[in-house]
Image (tube, grey):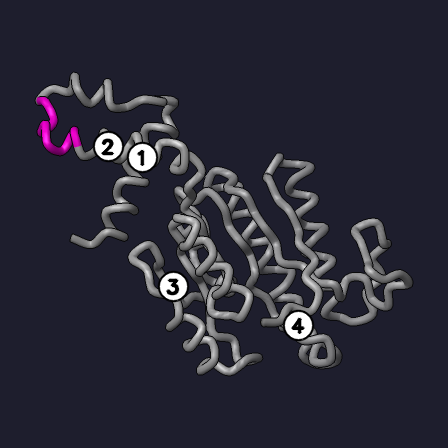
Amino acid sequence: DNPMFARSLANRFWSYFFSRGIIDPVDDLRTTNPPINPELLDALTKDFIAHRFDVRHLMRTIVTGAAGFIGSHLVRRLLDDGHDVVGVDNFSPYYAQELKELNLAAVASPRFEFLEADLGATDLVTMFDGVDAVFHLAGQPGVRASWGSTFHEYIDANVAVTQRVLEAALAAGSPRIVYASSSSIYGEAETFPTDEHTIPAPRSPYGVTKLAAEHLCRLYAANFALPTVSLRFFTVYG
């Protein structure tokens, strides 16, 4: 009786066939042994005709940093587009946990699963199994706070964790990796608007770690054909 659950179930059903190159599974269902229930077959046939062009691209996705401002909006957009989403966050204290919990409270879908986990210690290979894309937004933010004795936190969260994500993706079948970089990799850019042809010259330890993670993504793409893309976010508001 739950239409969202039924839609998700149907999406998984048809995606199973499409992933195996079966473009019209209805004919195959008619010849199953034992035969499928005729009423169920009729319902699935109507569903197939109605949705056959929009289920091929549905994905099972992971969003790290899902409780954050950007992450929670991305989760909602992916769900609105029909994808399944696993959100991961460790509620690091840089931003108030209460705000993050409010962000998550705005996400309500049977296709959303939330995991509170530390990406530096969790079994990511198991987490990534069967996933089509990983949106890696988690990291340690803050330009000013990255100086001095806290720099190791930025190395761990922005560089070491990204390397773990990339290694796990390789072991789990190479899902697409979308990495959230930062405009801080440009430092004091000489031109505005600043585009991808501008040479990175970070002026903060934070920017250095975000650029280092970009280089890791490029290395895994070049050496292991792992599909990666880095997005350099500027000031995001809303």
Closest to the camera, between mark 3 and mark 1, is: 1
Circle 4 residues within 10 Å: few <14, some 14–19, many ≥20: few
Residue 188's x, y, as percent?
A: 86, 68
> Is residue 41 found inside the magenta-colored segment of the image?
yes
Q: Quadrant of residue 26?
A: top left
Residue at x 13%, y 33% (from the top left corner): 40
Boundaries of the magenta span? 35-42
Vertical placement of 192 versus 130: above or below?
Answer: below
Residue at x 23%, y 29% (from the top left corner): 45
Residue under circle 2? 46
Closest to the camera, between mark 3 and mark 2, is: 2
Return the residue nearer the eye: 235 or 144. 235
Residue under circle 3? 115
Mark 1 to mark 2: distance in Å?
A: 6 Å
Mark 1 to mark 4: distance in Å?
A: 53 Å
Vertical placement of 129 versus 32: above or below?
Answer: below
Return the residue nearer the eye: 157 or 94. 94
- The amino acid at mark 1 is Ala
Return the residue nearer the eye: 197 or 1. 1
Q: Which is nearer the N-term, disc 2 or disc 4?
A: 2
Q: Quadrant of residue 9?
A: top left
Closest to the camera, between mark 3 and mark 4, is: 3
